[in-house]
C-alpha cells in the first residue's frame, strides 16, 4: 500500500543527515498523519461499499434459494394433482418438468451468489485488516509526533542555553572581577590610611593641648595667693 511507502519515507526523513532543522521531520510527520487519515477515510468508504455488495450477494443467495425451494414444492404439488387426476398426467409431467428446470436455474443462481458472497466476505476481511492497520499506524505516529515535539522543545531550550554559555566571555569576566578586587583593595587601603591620619592628628592635638595646659600652674598660683591671704605662708616660715 502507498501508506507504508510514505511511512518508510518518513522514517528515512528522520534519519536523513541532510535535514538539519528539527521542524522538517515534524512537518513531514504531520503531513504523513494527514495522508494516513485520508487513506483511512477512503478505506472506510471502500469497506462500506464492499460490505454492501456482500450483503446484496447474500440476499440474492437467499432469494434464489427460496425460488429453488418454491419450484421444488410446485413440482411436487403438480405431480400430486396429476396423480389425483386433477390435471392430466401428461400435462402434470410437463409442468412439473418445467418447474424442476426453473429450480435448477435458481440453484445455479444460488451457487453464483454464494461465490460472490464469499468473495466479498474475503474482501471485507482484508479491508477491515487494512483499516485496523492504518488506525494503529495513525495512533503510533501521533504518539511519535508528541514525542518529537517534546524533543524539539528540549533541544531548542538546551541549544539556547548552550549558546548563551558559549557566548560568555570568561576572560573578560575574570578580568572584570580582578579589577573589582583591586579597586576594593585600594578603597580599603585608602580607608585605612585616612584612619591612620585621623589618629595621628588626634595624638598631636592631645600633645599640644597637654603642653599648653596652664590649669595646674593657675591652681598653684591660686593656692599660694589664698595662703597669703590667710597668713599661712608666714606662719609656716616662722615655724620652720
Image: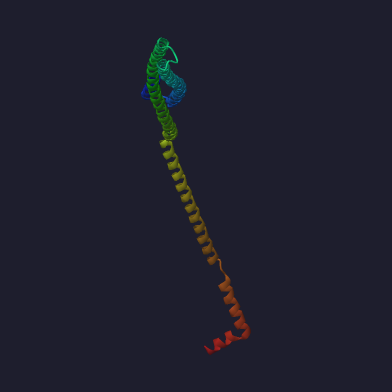
Whether residue 17 appears in this view of the structure is no
Percent of width and height locating residue 66: 43, 20
Q: Quadrant of residue 104?
A: top left
* Quadrant hosting residue 148: top left
Instruction: Count how many numbered circles sit on residues in the image.
Output: 0
Q: Nearer the viewer, residue 192 or 98?
A: 98
Give the x, y percent position of residue 92.
42, 12
The answer to whether residue 94 shows anywhere in this view is yes
Query: Depth check: 64 or 41 in front?
Result: 64
Q: Answer above or below: position of 13 versus 173.
A: above
Q: Residue furthest right?
A: 229
- In the displayed structure, 20 sits above or below 205; it is above
Residue extending farthest to the bottom is: 239
Residue 21, how many percent across, how many down? 43, 25
Q: How is the image coloured?
A: rainbow
Q: Quadrant of the N terminus?
A: top left
Residue located 50% across and 53% down the image: 194
Q: Nearer the viewer, residue 68 or 100?
A: 100
Amino acid at each position: 500500500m502507498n501508506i507504508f511507502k510514505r511511512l518508510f519515507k518518513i522514517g528515512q526523513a528522520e534519519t536523513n543527515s541532510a535535514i538539519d532543522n528539527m521542524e522538517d521531520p515534524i512537518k513531514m510527520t504531520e503531513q504523513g498523519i494527514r495522508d494516513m487519515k485520508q487513506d483511512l477515510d477512503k478505506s472506510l468508504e471502500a469497506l462500506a461499499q464492499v460490505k454492501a455488495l456482500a450483503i446484496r450477494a447474500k440476499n440474492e443467495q437467499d432469494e434464489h434459494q427460496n425460488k429453488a425451494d418454491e419450484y421444488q414444492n410446485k413440482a411436487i404439488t403438480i405431480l400430486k394433482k396429476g396423480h389425483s387426476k386433477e390435471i392430466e398426467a401428461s400435462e402434470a409431467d410437463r409442468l412439473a418438468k418445467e418447474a424442476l428446470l426453473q429450480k435448477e436455474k435458481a440453484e445455479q443462481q444460488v451457487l453464483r451468489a454464494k461465490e460472490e458472497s464469499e468473495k466479498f466476505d474475503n474482501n471485507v476481511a482484508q479491508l477491515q485488516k487494512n483499516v485496523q492497520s492504518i488506525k494503529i499506524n495513525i495512533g503510533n505516529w501521533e504518539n511519535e509526533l508528541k514525542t518529537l515535539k517534546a524533543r524539539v522543545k528540549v533541544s531548542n531550550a538546551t541549544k539556547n542555553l548552550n549558546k548563551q554559555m558559549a557566548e560568555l566571555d570568561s576572560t573578560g569576566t575574570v578580568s572584570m572581577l580582578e579589577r573589582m578586587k583591586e579597586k576594593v583593595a585600594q578603597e580599603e587601603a585608602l580607608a585605612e590610611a585616612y584612619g591612620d591620619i585621623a589618629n595621628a592628628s588626634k595624638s598631636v592635638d592631645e600633645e599640644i593641648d597637654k603642653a599648653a595646659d596652664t590649669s595646674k600652674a593657675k591652681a598653684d598660683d591660686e593656692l599660694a595667693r589664698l595662703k597669703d591671704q590667710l597668713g599661712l605662708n608666714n606662719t609656716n616660715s616662722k615655724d620652720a
